[in-house]
Structure formats: structure tokens, C-alpha cells
Amino acid sequence: MATAIKKKKSLVKNLVRFSVNGTAVELEIGTLPHQVETAHTLAHTLRETLGLVGTKVTCDNGACGSCTVLMDGKAVLSCMTLTVECQGRSITTIEGLADPETGRLDPLQQSFIDHTAFQCGFCTPGMIMSAKALLADNPSPTEADVKEALSGNFCRCISHYQVLRAVMATAQGGE
Amino acid sequence: MAEVYRFIGKPTRRKDAVEVVTGTTQYLDDIRFPDLLHGKVLRSPHPHAIIKKIDKSRAEQLPGVKAILTWQDVPDWKGGTPRVVRILDRKVRYVGDAVALVAATSAQIAKEALGLIDVEYELLPAVFDVEEVMKPGAPQLYDELPGNIVTPGTPAFGHSCLTEVVMGDVEQGFREAEVISEGTFGYENIPNPIPPEPPGAVAIWEEPNRVTLWVSNQASYLDKILLFHVFGKKVEVRTHGAACGGSFGTKLMSWQVQTYATLLSRATGRPVKIIFSKEEHIAAFVLRPGSRMQARVGMKKDGTVTAVSGTWLVDTGYYSATTQAQVAVGCGEIQLMTRCANWDLKTAIICTNRNASGSVRGFGGQELKCSFIPVLCLAMEKLDIDPVDFIKKNYVKPGDGYFWRDGLWYTYRGIDYSDAMDQGAMRFGWREKWQGWLKPSSVDGSKRRGVGVGVHGNADIGEDSSEAWVRLNPDGSALLYSCITEHGTGQRSNYVKMVAEVLQLPMERVTVTPADSLINPFEYGPFGSRGTYAIGSAAIAAAEDARRQLLELVAPRLDAKPEELETVDGVVFVRDSPERKIKWGAIGYDRTVMGYGRFDPDFTLANCMITFVEVEVDTETGKVDLLQVVNTTDVGQIIDPPGLEGQLNGCLGSSGIDSALFEETILDHSSGHILNANMIDYKWRTFSELPPIDNIVLETPVASHRFKAIGVGEVATSPGPMAVLMAVSNALGVWLHEYPVTPERVLKALGKLPAMTRTGGAQ
Ligand code: FES
Ligand code: FES
């Protein structure tokens, strides 16, 4: 009995801490409604617990890229990442790209607008985050690099051609 | 040559662009509701069974479960055409059919509860093939549909709804023919458009008989009307159309998920949300209809088609909602592409024990042509007719007539598309690449290239009715009332653009109402390619009406006649002495001006899309690569160049061209299960596999509305699949007649794997 209580206590105290778009987040791990369950995906936590619904879930199965966010600058599938794995990490979502002070859009976002690089727009946040990770890593990608980096992003409307132009225009030495 | 406008024809920023790129667009699942419950659906693991017993007691014990509904708990509401499909029934008719609905405080609890519902089934024999299902003694899906044949025609298109193409004298036509070809071909891979956003609904029931729904649909006003009828005309329905994360026709109606949410909200008194999982989306939402056609075609050396006869069998899965409409439109479309005096084409829609087919981009015509063009090709081969010449000769010309979906005869008053076809052929290099039937355009070791062409067109561009209001405000802004959800075509912004052009207001000063059925007038919705002409006409007419009223109001103040006035940027002035001017504000702060516009159906115009493809087939592996695509069309006047480009590029995915290459829904005929109901096993095109696409768009003014434009977006997917089949056949030198052209089928056709059993041939 005593050990059970102890265990419960320590679970309640169990916290996962990470940052989202520069803001520190501290969440209890547990099974109560306000807590993060160990089975919760980052996509779930972002959308349902933190209310950041800009991250879209299409397949919830690691197949489509629409839930892509940045973890320490690298693109990850938030539907395949457990929230408890985010301990100490820095997460960036689509909501975190515009300048928080001025509201000015990230050049990549602006380029997506200028090239109408979307149709229904449901895949777009994921596309932008994947492209963002690529450009951080490789500021002057070739078209082939962009295609490779975005090859995990499903777009049923076929916005690919316009997305490609939008990303290339933002790349260094682009349009 | 198109006219020059201030906004029309120029690339302008989508009104929702900032929201889309910042992730703030509100799709259905992004809207927050207080006190929300989550719904889940228990689905049948059997393709055909009677529910003998359901025990929900264990599930009801689960904390957080608020309601569990089975067929015994729900009213006798019915949907489908005819109305035979109960929301929950004692009988299940496909793997995935709804057995019970659960509402709980979280999606997870609802899901857990599903596993605690005990169901006892009495299994019935199931049937999956259109011809098997019509045989005497075959299992019957509905008492109301003897022989599993769905009642032809849809009340939506009137009592004379087109169900066949019968005219002239086919016997005489076949006597005049120089070649007769026949065969039975199909387009039966039931591809799934799979928009990224899954189907869903949120419902809030208010006693005694009112429901408000948030829907993620292509046509939210129509949902209101449809549900009103499903609910036995006893429930008042209001719909809010959220941004729609892709539809491709499939979310034309989502009445089932909407009724599930409604029933659960009615049972719990709380808002209920249901969002399908991707597996449910693929296995229990909308597929393309299956199409199989036995046809006979008579042709002359010059490409004249002398007779067409045959039977078109359409597999609609376990029920039909729109299939009759698709058959009606398909029957119209086949006439648009085949100028022929003698027809005897019969149709039948059949129910089988699989997930239902429904509305998909290409709406009947794509399915029909994918089965019919192979028969035409056999005749063209015998006569050595170039398919581009054939299409040019046989696509509808001004003055031609056709029976359209309502069974009435219409005389075509649009343009001749020959010019567009020529330009497309030129850009593609057709004359250089075409070597004749079953001849590759080039061979390099095991790599063989071939070319193909397909055509599709639809007189739906002027179908159904639309209404709009435009309100002019004294501050020099305008508001368009139009019940349109944005589903990816950019049309919400395009109507703003049309209104801005009529009123000569900057686009920033024109907004459009949310798609709320309570505040907006009637709108059928952006089906087919009707957006530009039909919906656009209503918006334009409303803006013109408002403008007229405004000018009449201020004319006395300017001491002029209304017809002497112009308005630009919220200022009215006398055309010949612009210094005599007055701001819109002159109407007074206490007044607005409301213009009304309406569009009534017009079936005398049709669009046209021709797609050229080049493929490379590896005869060692059987793999087919798409090397080049050229789409060519004439839209009268481009409204928004990047939006149009997006629509045309859409030819690839959403069960378009790729449905001939690799997209298919794999149904296991022994268990009735769909084997690839996830996005890993259902193949889709990635960035690394993009072929170059050229879109040739001509602008020959057409007598539609004041901007002389027609829509074309829907049909982009349709000509491609048949073009691919033709191209692969030409590359290999043998006919391939099944979709998609998987490596296995290619190797079979080459005799490298055991032969296939399909029949067909020319006399
Ligand atoms: S939703 Fe995460 S990969 Fe599809
Ligand atoms: S824009 Fe619709 S899925 Fe990509």
C-alpha cells in the first residue's frame, strides 16, 4: 500500500518540460484530463492540450508529413513523437514562424502566399515546416534537394509545383 | 483575345492566404466547443450480416460514456437514393457498416467503449462482383431493391432524368460502319481521392427539433436541405461550413457522419464531434464508382462514329446517394465526346457488399470513358486513325445537340475546341511522337516509350441554381453573401474578385460571409466545374444590382442620370465630368444597399480538357514512369492564373491520372475487407516523382457571364487515365485494358507472367 501511494505521488510529480515557439511548457504526466499521458503524441498535446491547432493531422500514422514540426530545428512527425520524448527539447510549430513582436511572416510563409503554393491548405503547415527545416540545414538547395526534403509530405490537391517554386524563391540565390 | 481587367485574369492573393500559411485557417477539427463530447462508430467486421444481439451494458459502465446508440435506439431516418439506407440498421451490408454510435467525454474513452459492445451476428453470403450480384439467387442487400439493382434516375434531376442514351437507328448505323469494334472493359480499381482532412461533423441539438451542424463540406447549404429530408422533414437544420481540407467531390455530402453527430447530440443534450480516422475515411467513406462496360462501336474511315450500343454497369457498393446523378451526367458527357447519330446505350446501377461509391471529381464521365475509350481505340486501330484527329472531329461543335442529365435535348452554343487541341498537340510534340497504334514512340533497350491522349468535357458548368446578395456599405466596402466553403479551388476569393471588378473596389474592401446557411441565400455549392459560370453569375448579378441601386440613389445628388455615372474605389462620378463626384457615404450612415443575383441552370455550354501523356515502360521490371503531361483547355477568360494552374496540376492525384498508374483500393473478395485502408499501403505520388506538366489555356470569349469565362477545374483528373492506358499499350505493342497498369499487369501483357483473362477485340 505504502509503495503504491509513493508511486502515485512520484508520478504526479513527474513533469515533462520543453519549449514551444520559445515559450516554456511544463506538463504533468498522468492520466487526469489536464495531464499528459505517456501514450500522447506531440501532435495530440499540441492540438488538444496546448490549443496549437495549426499543426494538422491527416494520417496519424507517420505516412503523410502533415503534422511536421521542428524539434531543435529538425523536422519531426509530431504524430509519431511521444510528448514525453520532448523533455528538454525546443519545438517550433507553424504558429511560431512569424515574428512574435512584429507579426511579420517568415519569408517562407510570404513566399507560399506569393506563389499561391496551396489549394485546400490542409497540408500546407506541414509543407512549410519541412521546407523550413531544409532551408535551415541547407540555405541553397537545388530543386532536387527540395523534392527530396518534401518527399514525405502528402498533398492531394497537387500544390507541389507551386510549393517547389515558393521554396526555391526563398532559398539563397533563389528568384 | 481576352479583355484586360483590373483584377480578373491577374494573379491576386487568396483572401485566406495568411490564415493558410500561419496555420490559423479553421478546419472543422480546429474549432473549439465548450462541453464537447466525442463520438465514435462501431463498425461491422462482416460484409453482410444480421445483427442478432447487441449488448451495450459493459460499455455503458465505462466512466465518461454518455450515450450508446444502436439500431434499436434511433428514429427511422433514411438517406440514399432511393431513400432506403437507415442511419443504423439491423442489417450490415459491408465491412465498415455502422453498428453502434458512442459519445463520451474523450475520443479515447469513446474508442475504448467500442471494444466493450458485444455484438452477435448472423452471417449472410456476400457478393462483390457486378455481374454475380445480378444473377438469380444472389444475396439481396435491400428488400426494396430486387436483384440488387438500384432504382434508376434521381429525383434531383426531374422525372425524365437521363438513364440511357437511345436515339437514331443503331442497326442502320452499324450497317454504315466500315469497322465495328466491341469489347467489355472496366475501370474497377475503385480509387479513392482521399482528401487530407478526414470527414467529420459537430452537431448541437436543441429540443424539440432543431440542429446546428458544423460541417467540413464542399456544399454546406445543400447539407441543410439534404439532412432536412433525411430527418423526415421534421427537423430544422442550420449548417456552418468550415474551411474544407480537400474534397475532390467526395465531401459533396457527408450525411452519415452528420446524422451520427446529430443523433448523439440529441441523445446527450451536448455538442458532439465525430472525426473519422484515416482508416474509416478510406474504408467507410467515398470511393469512385466501379465501371464495367460492354460496348459495340461502328466507325468509318474518316473517324465518323456511326453507332454506339452497349450496357454500362455501375457498381455503387452498398448503397447509392449520387450514383444515379453520375450515370445521368456520364451519359451526357459521352455524347459530348462522341458525335454520333445512333445510340443504344443502356445502364444499370448495382449494389454490392463493399464500401459505397459516391461523388468524385470526374462524376460518372471519367468512369464511363475509362471503360468506353478502349473500345473506340480498337476501331481507330483498325482504321489507322490518329486519336487526336478523332477527338477533334468528334468533340461537340457549336450547333450540335445532346441529351443532358434531365433527359432534355440541348443545342450547344459554346466554342469549338479544335484550336486548343491543336495547340496542345503542338506543345506536346504529338505529330513527332505518334507512330501509329501499338507502336512505341521510341525504344532504348528494355525502355519503351509511348504516347496517349484523352478527352473529357462537361456541360455541368452551368448546372443548378445559385443565389447571392451584395451589400454596399456607406464606408465604401462591400459584402458578398454566398454560402460557399473554401475547399481548395480559391473560388471564395474569385467571387470577391468578380464583385470587386464590377464595383471597381480594391479586393481588400470586399469580403464574403461565412458559409452559414442561416444568413446566406440558396447555394447549390461548387460542384463539378459550375463555380465560375453558375456561382460567379449570381455574384456578378448581385453586384450589378447593388451598383445600379447605388447609382440611382446618388444620381439626384450629382444632378445626373444613373446611366451617366461610374463608380471607382467607393466614389461615384459623372463619366464625362469626373470632377462631379460623391463618396458612397453620401447614401447616409443609416443605409446600406443590397443587390440580389440569381443563376438558373444552363446546359448549353460545356468545357473541355484534353490530356496528352508520354510514358516510359521498363519491360524488364514492368514499371511505368510518367514522363510528361500536357493539359490543354479553353476557359474563355482566366479569372485567377495561379488558382487555375493548381486545379490543372490536380490532374495527377485524387484518383486522376494516377488511378491508371498505381492508385487502387484493394478489396479482398473473400472477406470483404479493404486491404490498403491506410496511407502507406494506398499509394500516392510524392515530390520525387513529379512529371513535368504543361498547361495550355486558351481564352476564347464564351457567352457565359460578363467576364465570358467558364470553369474547368473538376475535369482535370478525367482525361488522364485513358491516355495512360493508350500510351502504355502503344509503348508495349499490346493492348492493356485494366487500371492501374501495375508492373504485374505489364509483365502479364508481355507474356512474362501467366496471361490475363479479359476479352475484347475488333472485327
Ligand atoms: S499525420 Fe503525422 S505523418 Fe500523417
Ligand atoms: S493543398 Fe490540399 S492537400 Fe495540399
Image (cartoon, rainbow, N blue to C red):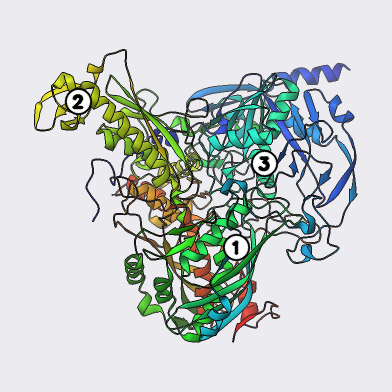
Residue B510 x/y as whole percent: 33, 30
Residue B656 x/y as whole percent: 53, 59
Residue B114 vs residue B540: left or right? right
Q: Mark 2 lies on which chain?
A: B
Q: Which of marks 2 and 1 is nearer the N terminus?
A: 1
Residue under pointer 2: B571
Residue under pointer 3: B277
Q: What element carries label 2?
A: strand
Q: Is mark 1 on a helix, strand or loop?
A: loop
Q: Earlier in the sequence, mark 2 or mark 3?
A: 3
The answer to whether B480 is drawn above or below residue B277 in the figure is: above
Please count the marks in the image.
3
- Closer to us: mark 2 or mark 3? 2
Give amino acid for label 2. Val
For label 1, the crowd category at 10 Å Cα-Cα, with few meaning under 14, some 14 to 19 and many 20 or more, is: many
For label 3, the crowd category at 10 Å Cα-Cα, with few meaning under 14, some 14 to 19 and many 20 or more, is: some
- The reply to whether residue B616 is in sight is yes
- Mark 3 Cβ inside 8 Å of ligand 1: no
**Quadrant of the picture in which ligand 1 is shown:** top right
Give amino acid for label 1. Glu
Q: Do the residues under discs 3 and 1 have CB atoms within 8 angstroms? A: no
Give amino acid for label 3. Ser
Marks 2 and 3 share the same chain: yes
- Mark 1 Cβ inside 8 Å of ligand 2: no
Q: Which of marks 3 and 1 is nearer the N terminus?
A: 1
C-alpha distance separating marks 2 and 1: 55 Å
Residue under pointer 1: B164
C-alpha distance separating marks 2 and 3: 52 Å
- The reply to whether residue A85 is in sight is no
C-alpha distance separating marks 3 and 1: 38 Å
